[in-house]
Image (spheres, rainbow, N blue to C red):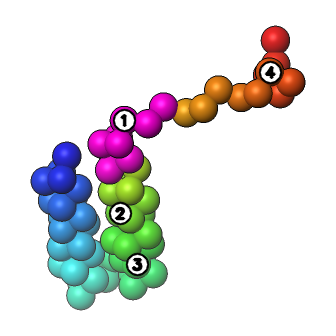
Amino acid sequence: MLNQNIWSSLTAKAMSAIGAPFGYVSVLMGIVIGDVGMSLGVTGNAMQLTGLEPDEPPAELSVE
């Protein structure tokens, strides 16, 4: 899982760095995809390692 997180983040950064000088990737797109998007993806992927299950909602809030 850690290797997947590292390689996906590095790949997104490399693609942004390669595409930016040629005009394929704007600076804003590189920031959004390379930093924000990968941070969310890596965090979500790492949360799988914890093995936590979502809590059950209280009985008065559950819809039947």
Amino acid beneath label 1: Gly
Is residue 37 left or right of 42 when viewed as pictured?
A: right
Q: Which residue is mark 2?
A: 38
Q: Residue at x 44, y 36 (%)?
A: 52
In the rendered image, the vertical position of residue 55 relative to residue 33, given as above or below: above
Task: State which quadrant residue 57 falls in.
Answer: top right
Amino acid beneath label 4: Ala
Q: Which residue is mark 3?
A: 31
Task: State which quadrant residue 39 falls in.
Answer: bottom left
Mark 3–mark 2 CB contact (< 8 Å): no
Earlier residue among tags 4 and 2: 2
Q: Which mark is residue 22?
A: none
Choose mark 4 or mark 3, whichever is in front: 4
Q: Quadrant of the C terminus?
A: top right
Q: Which residue is mark 1?
A: 51
10 Å crowding of disc 1: few (<14), some (14-19), many (20+): few
The x and y percentages for residue 3 are 13, 53
Q: State which region is magenta.
A: 46-53
Q: Secondary structure at mark 2?
A: helix
10 Å crowding of disc 3: few (<14), some (14-19), many (20+): some
Q: Nearer the viewer, residue 36 or 22?
A: 36
